């Protein structure tokens, strides 16, 4: 019975840690694009990339998903 008195606070602590990690992931945008990676694998890459003059590319910020550009 004494063991359960130590396990309950420990499990509450781990539960709060997991809730904190979930909130952190939501704020960082981890769940914004749920279908992007699954659809990106099906897209063809047959077109050559336009790296010549006049190419307008968006500046990619770390941590964001751009499913229309690879």
Image (cartoon, rainbow, N blue to C red):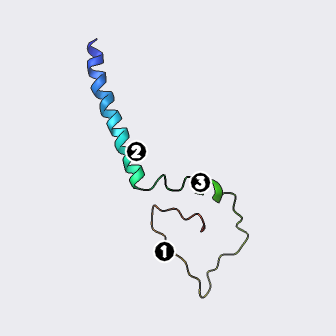
- In the depicted structure, whether residue 63 falls above or below residue 34: below
Q: Which mark is residue 11?
A: none
Outermost residue on the top side: it is 1
Dot placed on the residue nearer the N-terminal end, 1 or 3: 3
Question: Which quarter of the figure is the C terminus placed in?
Answer: bottom right
- Check contact, mark 2 vs mark 1: CB within 8 A: no
Relative image position of residue 54 (x, y in whole percent): 59, 87
- In the depicted structure, whether residue 18 falls above or below residue 10: below
Mark 2 or mark 1: which is in front? 2
Q: Judging from the image, what secondary structure is the residue with disc 2 in?
A: helix
Question: Which quarter of the figure is the N terminus placed in?
Answer: top left
State how far apart marks 2 and 1 are (Cα).
28 Å
State how far apart marks 2 and 3 are (Cα).
19 Å
Q: Residue at x 66, y 57 (%)?
A: 41
Q: Judging from the image, what secondary structure is the residue with disc 1 in?
A: loop
Residue at label 2? 22
- In the depicted structure, whether residue 50 falls above or below residue 38: below
> How many neighbours does mark 1 have within 10 angstroms: few (below 14), some (14-19), or many (20 or more)?
few
13 sits left or right of 56 in the view: left
Q: Residue at x 45, y 68 (%)?
A: 61
State how far apart marks 1 and 3 are (Cα).
22 Å
Q: Which mark is residue 59?
A: 1
Relative image position of residue 10 (x, y in whole percent): 30, 28
59 sits left or right of 47 in the view: left
Q: Which mark is residue 35?
A: 3
Relative image position of residue 58 (x, y in whole percent): 52, 75
- Check contact, mark 1 vs mark 3: CB within 8 A: no
> How many neighbours does mark 2 have within 10 angstroms: few (below 14), some (14-19), or many (20 or more)?
few
Q: Judging from the image, what secondary structure is the residue with disc 3 in?
A: loop
**Image quadrant assignment for residue 22:** top left
């Amino acid at each position: 019975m004494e063991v359960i008195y130590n396990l309950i606070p420990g499990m509450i602590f781990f539960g709060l840690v997991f809730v904190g990690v979930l909130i952190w992931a939501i704020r960082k945008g981890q769940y914004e694009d749920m279908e992007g990676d699954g659809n990106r694998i099906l897209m063809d890459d047959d077109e050559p990339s336009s790296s010549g003059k006049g190419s307008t590319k968006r500046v990619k910020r770390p941590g964001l998903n751009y499913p229309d550009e690879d």
